[in-house]
Image (cartoon, rainbow, N blue to C red):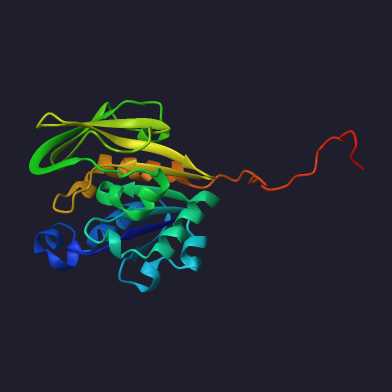
Amino acid sequence: MVKVTVWNENRHEQKDQEVRDVYPEGIHGAIAAFLENEDFEVRTATLDEAEHGLTEEVLNSTDVLLWWGHIAHEEVQDEIVERVKQRVLDGMGLIVLHSGHFSKIFKTLMGTSCDLKWREANEKERIWIVDPSHPIVEGLGEYIELEREEMYGEHFDIPAPDELVMVSWFQGGEVFRSGCTYRRGNGKVFYFRPGHETYPTYYNVEVQKVISNAVKWAKPTNNTKPVYGNAKPLEKLDGMN
């Protein structure tokens, strides 16, 4: 069974009644609820827990970590960011959602500013699937349509994705690379754009399908991990005993 940890800074839910009305159990609670229906072993963690809920014990028993953050990126301790990074390099999957593009962990793994254009104007978003063969979009049609979402627009300052799975179009005219995969060390990373806190995006069954598929895609492989450092030759070399 895939072990999933859903991390959310959980600050909007404490400060904003509109967000509480949409996500009474928190964004992490809403995501965990539908993932549990997929027969994953799911737990949640939030910013204000000790070590942000991401202790070594938790991370070492996590196959895939989901990350939602927005207004408190700088409050995440660098020590915890490094801990998450090392787990990704060791093989843990990471799914970064919506405004998590500005999280310390995503910027660290990307090596760029991860900046973008944005606008909150209740716009329609049409998420076009541009790689229909990819397992993350298995079971979906040609696009996902959301009646209201926050706009993110290009240029999105990220490295060229290993795989570009989805591209969004917004009613105001912008487009955005909204489904991007990366490999970092032995781990897999997926960035998925939709999910502004005042919209019920995470109740959309197609959005849920993408995230569930992404968990299955991002889970660690069982391959033998590479050995680094000085290596003895496999064959006999002239001049060596």
Residue at the (19%, 49%) spot, across then down: 196
Q: Quadrant of residue 45?
A: bottom left
Which sits in the foreground, 142 or 75? 75
Residue 123 lies, in percent from the top left, at 10, 38
Residue 20 lies, in percent from the top left, at 15, 62
Image position of 233 (left or right of 66): right
Residue at the (34%, 33%) spot, across then down: 139
Image position of 240 (left or right of 174): right
Residue at the (45%, 68%) spot, across then down: 55
Is residue 1 in view from this perspective?
no
Q: Quadrant of residue 223?
A: top right
Residue at the (36%, 53%) spot, across then down: 66
Residue farthest toward the bottom in the current orientation of the protein: 50
Q: Indicate whether 17 appears above or below 176.
A: below
Residue 212 lies, in percent from the top left, at 37, 45
Which sits in the foreground, 113 or 56? 113
